[in-house]
């Protein structure tokens, strides 16, 4: 299938049409998909248009191993300028003493922290994957899970919240060198002081991986772990922040040298300077009042979506949300697993992801739930009214049990919604 009707008549597109029509066709196909469908994966978003410009800029041509003022290659006037801007803006935005803007993405960012501040074999206390933690929080299948001794805390099955009494108990028994908090599928907020108290008691460093909610913390609509005295905070820049794919490490000054050396030369070679330029712009845009308004809408929309689903008897893990995401238990709500639910929602233009739930009895490729989030829909301009219609489409799709006529009608309803809200940057 070609998407030639979407070909913009610009020199770069005309050039690509001649040099690589297959790739141009995929590009325009993806643009069409993003326009017509609704993105509900909580870790995805639409980058600011300025970010797309800078990612495609000549900064991609430049090697810049090292840090501003101390590089291994010449010609660094402008790379030094953008990295200095990025670091200073990130520090101001997150009230941090030090910022490293070079991690290529979220996983190397977390790896750089572990390898910079700890020794292989050290014990790290982190959240269990099925309870909301991330692969890089020591899942046994990850290299970090093999290099370090990860021990786990979980959520309380009675209310879905983190069980701090049990967490403190594990910390006393295992004496971790670091306590990691942060999540990729936990729909609640928490008080970082609770982690800090336990960490101080057992002499552990504190690290918060706020990759999902970095934008909401930047906008000051969710708590900032650095305000609670955390040693390190990491975040990706492409989720709620709407920046380029990349990672950001913020830390106390006392850890700056170890973190910088761990990122380069410890873990990475040349930073992606097009990404650093785009991150610098992101940090400026995220400091504006308009971004705070956006972040408040992300939270308001998530609450509205949770309420509208619950009103339709849909069962949510923890019963609701305090952040930008929610997890539907599709087995309990509709009698189908998350893989089937994701596929059905794909067919009606709603993009979600299958999701394991706490202590899931089903396997990861066929888990008990799906995960949904509001950052991308909110960036498009969706508000409370649209959230109610989204909840209706989700519910009716998952009840329809694959009925083709019903799904065709629901796809039309999705496209009626998305046609009213252009994708930023397209
Ligand atoms: N892939 C991201 C997420 O979806 O949460 C984390 O790496």
Image (cartoon, rainbow, N blue to C red):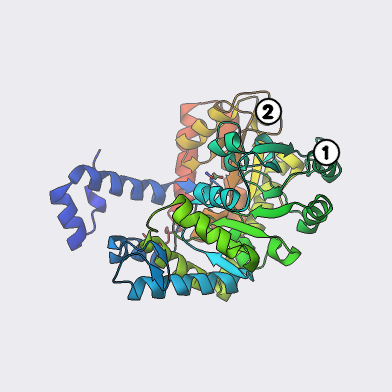
Compared with residue 243, is residue 156 higher up or lower down, i.e. above or below?
above
| Residue receiving disc 2 | 360
Q: Residue at x 81, y 55 (%)?
A: 200
Q: Position of residue 95 (x, y in %)?
A: 64, 71
Residue 232, quarter of the rendered image: bottom right
Q: Residue at x 61, y 25 (%)?
A: 336
Q: Residues within 10 Å of mark 2 (few under 14, many from 20)?
A: some
Q: Position of residue 355 (x, y in %)?
A: 60, 35
Using the numbered discs, state the Cα–Cα distance from disc 2 to disc 1 in whole angstroms: 26 Å
Q: Residues within 10 Å of mark 1 (few under 14, many from 20)?
A: few
The mark found on residue 173 in the picture is: 1
Q: Is residue 238 visible?
A: no
The mark found on residue 393 in the picture is: none
Q: Position of residue 281 (x, y in %)?
A: 45, 70
386, 409: nearer the viewer: 386
Q: Residue at x 66, y 34 (%)?
A: 130
Q: Is residue 343 visible?
A: yes
Q: Quadrant of ligand 1?
A: top right
From this viewpoint, which residue is outermost toward the left?
Answer: 18
Residue 21, quarter of the rendered image: top left
The secondary structure type at the circle numbered 2 is loop
Q: Position of residue 131 (x, y in %)?
A: 70, 38
């Amino acid at each position: 299938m070609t998407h030639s009707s979407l070909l913009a008549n610009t020199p770069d597109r005309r050039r690509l049409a001649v040099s690589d029509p297959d790739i141009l066709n995929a590009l325009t196909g993806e643009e069409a998909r993003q326009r017509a469908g609704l993105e509900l994966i909580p870790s995805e978003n639409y980058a600011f248009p300025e970010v797309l410009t800078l990612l495609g800029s000549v900064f991609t041509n430049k090697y810049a191993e090292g840090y501003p003022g101390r590089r291994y290659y010449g010609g660094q006037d402008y790379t030094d300028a953008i990295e200095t801007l990025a670091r200073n803006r990130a520090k101001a935005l997150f009230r941090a003493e030090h910022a490293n803007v070079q991690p290529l993405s979220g996983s190397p960012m977390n790896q750089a922290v572990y390898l910079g501040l700890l020794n292989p074999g050290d014990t790290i206390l982190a959240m269990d994957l099925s309870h909301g933690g991330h692969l890089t929080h020591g899942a046994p299948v990850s290299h970090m899970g093999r290099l370090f001794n990860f021990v786990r805390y979980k959520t309380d099955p009675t209310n879905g919240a983190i069980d701090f009494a049990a967490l403190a108990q594990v910390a006393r028994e295992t004496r971790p060198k670091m306590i990691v908090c942060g999540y990729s599928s936990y729909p609640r907020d928490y008080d970082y002081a609770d982690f800090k108290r336990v960490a101080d008691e057992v002499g552990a460093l504190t690290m918060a991986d706020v990759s999902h909610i970095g934008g909401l913390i930047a906008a000051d609509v969710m708590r900032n772990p650095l305000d609670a005295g955390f040693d390190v905070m990491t975040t990706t820049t492409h989720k709620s922040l709407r920046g380029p794919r990349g990672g950001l490490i913020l830390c106390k000054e006392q850890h700056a040298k170890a973190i910088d050396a761990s990122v380069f030369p410890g873990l990475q070679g040349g930073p992606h300077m097009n990404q650093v330029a785009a991150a610098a712009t992101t940090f400026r845009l995220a400091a504006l009042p308009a971004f705070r308004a956006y972040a408040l809408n992300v939270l308001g929309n998530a609450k509205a979506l949770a309420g509208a689903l619950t009103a339709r008897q849909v069962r949510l893990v923890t019963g609701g949300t305090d952040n930008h995401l929610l997890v539907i238990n599709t087995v309990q709500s509709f009698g189908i697993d998350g893989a089937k639910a994701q596929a059905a929602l794909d067919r009606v233009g709603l993009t979600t992801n299958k999701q394991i739930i706490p202590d899931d009895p089903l396997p990861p490729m066929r888990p008990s739930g799906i995960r949904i989030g509001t950052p991308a829909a909110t960036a498009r301009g969706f508000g409370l009214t649209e959230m109610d219609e989204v909840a209706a489409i989700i519910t009716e799709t998952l009840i329809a049990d694959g009925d083709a006529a019903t799904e065709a009608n629901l796809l039309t309803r999705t496209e009626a919604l998305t046609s009213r809200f252009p994708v930023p940057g397209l």
